[in-house]
Amino acid sequence: MHANAGDRVVIKGHRVHDPDRWCQVLEVRGTDGGPPYLVKWGDDGHESLFFPGSDAIVATEQGGSR
């Protein structure tokens, strides 16, 4: 996974009717845009260090996804 500060990471819900969860990348701490990422969570605003799993996608600031 590759992300830049300002990108949004979206984690798909795991079961039917589970909402997607998202966070805003504040800082990239890995090499070459890789994890871990310092993020701010959209649902409650807390900040944490995040290592995304295979269920996560990056939505760029321009509106695309990677």
Image: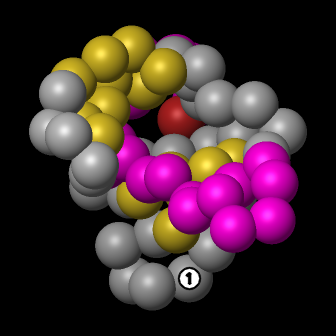
- Specify whether residue 38 is in view: yes
Toward the left, the furthest residue is: 45
Q: Residue at x 53, y 35 (%)?
A: 33
In this rendering, position of residue 20 left or right of residue 28: right
Identify the residue shown where x is 81% and y is 54%. Answer: 15
Q: Residue furthest bottom?
A: 63
Residue 20 position, x and y percent, is 57, 60
Secondary structure found at label 1: loop
Task: Say which of 26 and 30 sits in front.
Answer: 26
Quadrant where the C terminus sits is bottom right
Residue 10 higher or lower than 4, as above or below = below
Task: Name the spot of residue 1 as percent of width and height, x first.
Answer: 71, 41
Residue 27 in sight in this render? no
Q: Please determine whether, in this image, residue 44 is positioned above or below residue 63.
A: above
Count of marks overlaid on the render? 1
Residue range highlighted in magenta? 13-32
Q: Nearer the viewer, residue 24 or 46?
A: 46
Residue at 29% from the left image edge and 40% from the top image edge: 41
Residue 49, percent from left and from top: 39, 14
In the image, residue 33 above or below residue 55: above
Query: How is colour applied across the structure in the image?
Result: secondary structure
- The image quarter containing residue 27 is top left
Q: Residues within 10 Å of mark 1 (few under 14, many from 20)?
A: few
Q: Which residue is labeled 1 in the image? A: 64
**Place of residue 35 in the rendered image (x, y in percent of width and height, measured from the top left):** 57, 23
The stretch drawn in magenta includes residue 4: no
Q: What amino acid is found at the position of numbered circle 1 in the picture?
A: Gly
The quadrant holding residue 38 is top left
